[in-house]
Image: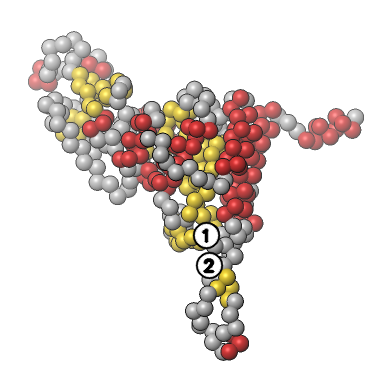
Amino acid sequence: MQGKLHDFRPERILQEFLARCVVDVSANMGLLGDTNSLSVTFDGSAYYSGASHYGVKVCDCRSKGIYNCTCPRRYSDPDATWGWDSYREQWFYGDTLFNVTASDSPNDLPIYLRIVQASRHDSITTVFALRDIHNMYSKIYFRNFLADGAMDNYPTYKLIKFYDILPFIALDSRTKAKFNYPHPDIICFDNKGRSICPGGIPYVYRGLCKPYRLKYRCWFAVYSKEPPEECKCSNSAYEKTLYIKAGYDPRMFTPMPRYSQTFKDIFKTRTSVERSNKRVFIYYAVEDANSRSSMMRFSMATFSAVNIHLDAWIKSKKFSLINEIKETAA
């Protein structure tokens, strides 16, 4: 937030190439979605190295009959590290490919890639990625931030608020949600995080009042129902209205409540980054190259991202190579 984040990444030239020569073209073609209010989703994937973690013996111990020596070995991929592949639930040797995808795009277009050590947690890479996409895409306004539970931590919410982005982050599966907001008109919260009025009825969420204040109204007032006499807690025709400060606990009281239908609809689009990763690793099979350096692995990933955009261009323009050949021949 103070602009002191370390900014050294050898892959910058490929990131700039992807941004200026490819992503900008897709944005001008309208393939990313609304660049004045863009939703982006973040995710990291295990990127296996083509090298062996055992290394190669360079000593002559084998000729002497010593097969279990501890002599130094030569490693063809010294940049690779060990990390945990949560999808396959196993340890792997290689890197982590971090992908930022425009989730509003029906073509699941990646706009930013970064390769980091396999042992680095995605929440740390997110900090760098947020800084980079704001610097690289100064003409795009990022509206919604979509991520899984790996980014569910208070510093990330604080940083997202600094960038004026709305968080759509799933609660960490290990989190025991505790809603403890002191308010005279709230007796408790239910298991969905909805505030309950003194009459035992959930308040209805009515939107975000900036700066980051959540508005709730009486259920009867919202649905134009006459409240029973024992439940009438206000003499106003507008009925009871209350506000919750999202800054009190940004994880529990997000600007868009997790139980709301809007949150669910937007969060569903987070799968776009998973489909983008699938195209990189399955359709374009970048791991089949058995690359033995982080540089080559990131290059392969960048070229596959370029191809994803090219596929979207062809689909948008309805380009057919066969028709071009026929017209040329004619």
Task: Indicate the position of residue 142 as horizontal and vertical percent values.
Answer: 46, 29
Task: Indicate the position of residue 19 as horizontal and vertical percent values.
Answer: 59, 35
Task: Indicate the position of residue 146 as horizontal and vertical percent values.
Answer: 42, 36
At x 52% / y 46%, what residue is drawn?
9
Task: Indicate the position of residue 276 as horizontal and vertical percent values.
Answer: 55, 42
What is the residue that sits farthest to the right in this orientation?
330
Callout count: 2
Which residue is under mark 2? 53
Q: Would you call the spot at circle 2 few (<14 residues within 10 Å), some (14-19), or many (20 or more)?
A: some
- Tell whether label 2 touches label 1 (CB within 8 Å): yes
Task: Describe the element under mark 2 as helix, strand or loop.
Answer: loop
Considering only vertical position in the picture, is 146 above or below 53? above
- Quadrant showing the N terminus: top left
Residue 267 is at least partly visible in this image = no
Task: Describe the element under mark 1 as helix, strand or loop.
Answer: loop
At x 17% / y 36%, what residue is drawn?
180
Name which of mark 1 and mark 2 comes first in the sequence: 2
* Of the pair 85 and 295, the residue shown nearer to us: 295
Task: Identify which amino acid the numbered label 2 is placed on.
Answer: His
Query: Is 285 left or right of 157, judged from the image as shown?
Result: right
* Of the pair 187 and 63, the residue shown nearer to us: 63
Where is residue 119, by image quadrant?
Answer: bottom left
Query: Is 198 left or right of 98, judged from the image as shown?
Result: left
Which residue is under mark 1? 80
Mark 1 vs mark 2, CA separation in Å: 8 Å
Residue 257 is at least partly visible in this image = yes
